[in-house]
Amino acid sequence: MVNRFVLNGISYHGKGAIEEIPGIIKAKGFKKAFIASDPDLVKFGVTKKVTDLLDANSMDYVIYSEIKPNPTIENVKDGVAAYKESGADYMITIGGGSSMDTGKAIGIIINNPEFEDVRSLEGVAPTKNPTVFTIAVPTTAGTAAEATINYVITDTEKKRKFVCVDVNDIPNVAIVDPDMMSTMPKGLSAATGMDALTHAIEGYTTAAAWELADCLNLEAIKLISANLRKAVENDPEGREGMALGQFVTGMAFSNVGLGIAHSMAHTLGAVYDTPHGVACAMMLPIVMEYNQEATGDKFKHIAEAMGVDTTGMSVDEYRKAAIDAVKALSKDVGIPEKLPALKEEDLDFLAASAYADACRPGNPKETSEADMKELFRKLM
């Protein structure tokens, strides 16, 4: 069996990493940046941390901020038009998954105009050309979109999210600077951090998991478990640990895929606009319980990575310990266990939509729409 691993061309890590950006631009000879960033980041001066560097170096740019928390087909179409009008020759994406995912779709369409119908990018699209040269600057410690070959777009007309997987969409440069994450409020820190934990656990147990990804995902579980509570309290050490942990699992899960916790979270986001990290956090222990018999001894390693002493534990005990550790972390950072908006009459649509999601085939246990319906019901 041949395993493929796709990574950024280069990445920079640590406090002050954004200061590398002007040098990168000068070395490449670029003339004008198209900056994709969400409106709140622009409003509260987070985007300005990067644009100040560009201004200080007399570097031209235009900002596109018409991006929703769950980016839509319309966001992408408008962004493509804005890029064409701007005269830009490269892109900087600043934000969480929403900004980076929108930028990925824009950049792919600009260099592969035959895919201007955004829905044509769903799944594994046969694009020929790499995205527009992109420098990705995450402001959350969760999605790791700066390190992945995946992005997710919402189809509001059909009330669904669709996953796009494309080796041509990975940003050329990732700038992982914990200082860019310091303004995240507690709720966002918690949600994005639990998204990262879901990436690591699903990536570690997915059907396509193998040794190179496993070592990265296990280390990510350790980093996230040790640092998320501190990051939620805006502790600098916690921020730095989470910045690294989410990137480490991003490198891994991007190459091995995820499972039904993400399939179901995508659906909850599309139907109820549930924040993605919150949806992942609610679904993760439920899905772990469902999958546990198909995971061999991996829950033992998950439990240990989360700080549990499994000495003398039986298989059932260490599997329960891993699930309990996830529940405890989620509770400690303030994630709810239930989703009041969920309605019985929505369950059939939710189950069908989640079953059709691109992450579902990676689940370690064979699943059905009926199974998913019962898993969704556990949130009621």
Image (cartoon, rainbow, N blue to C red):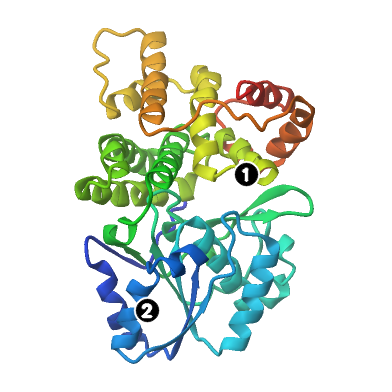
Q: In the drawing, does residue 286 fall left or right of residue 373?
A: left
The residue positioned 69% from the left and 77% from the top of the image is: 113
Of residues 123 and 53, the one drawn nearer to the viewer in this rendering: 53
Question: Of the numbered discs in the image, which one, if any, rests on residue 51?
Answer: 2
The residue positioned 44% from the left and 58% from the top of the image is: 6
Q: In the drawing, does residue 231 fall left or right of residue 199?
A: left
Of residues 50 and 135, the one drawn nearer to the viewer in this rendering: 50
Amino acid type at mark 2:
Thr
Q: Is residue 273 above or below residue 368?
A: below
Q: Which residue is mark 1?
A: 269
The answer to whether residue 38 of the structure is visible from this angle is no
Q: Is residue 374 above or below residue 66?
A: above
The answer to whether residue 214 of the structure is visible from this angle is yes
Q: Is residue 42 above or below residue 316?
A: below
Q: Earlier in the sequence, mark 1 or mark 2?
A: 2
The residue positioned 41% from the left and 16% from the top of the image is: 319
Q: In the drawing, does residue 100 fall left or right of residue 215?
A: right
- Residue 220 point in image, percent of width and height: 32, 41
In the displayed orientation, state which residue is furthest to the front: 43
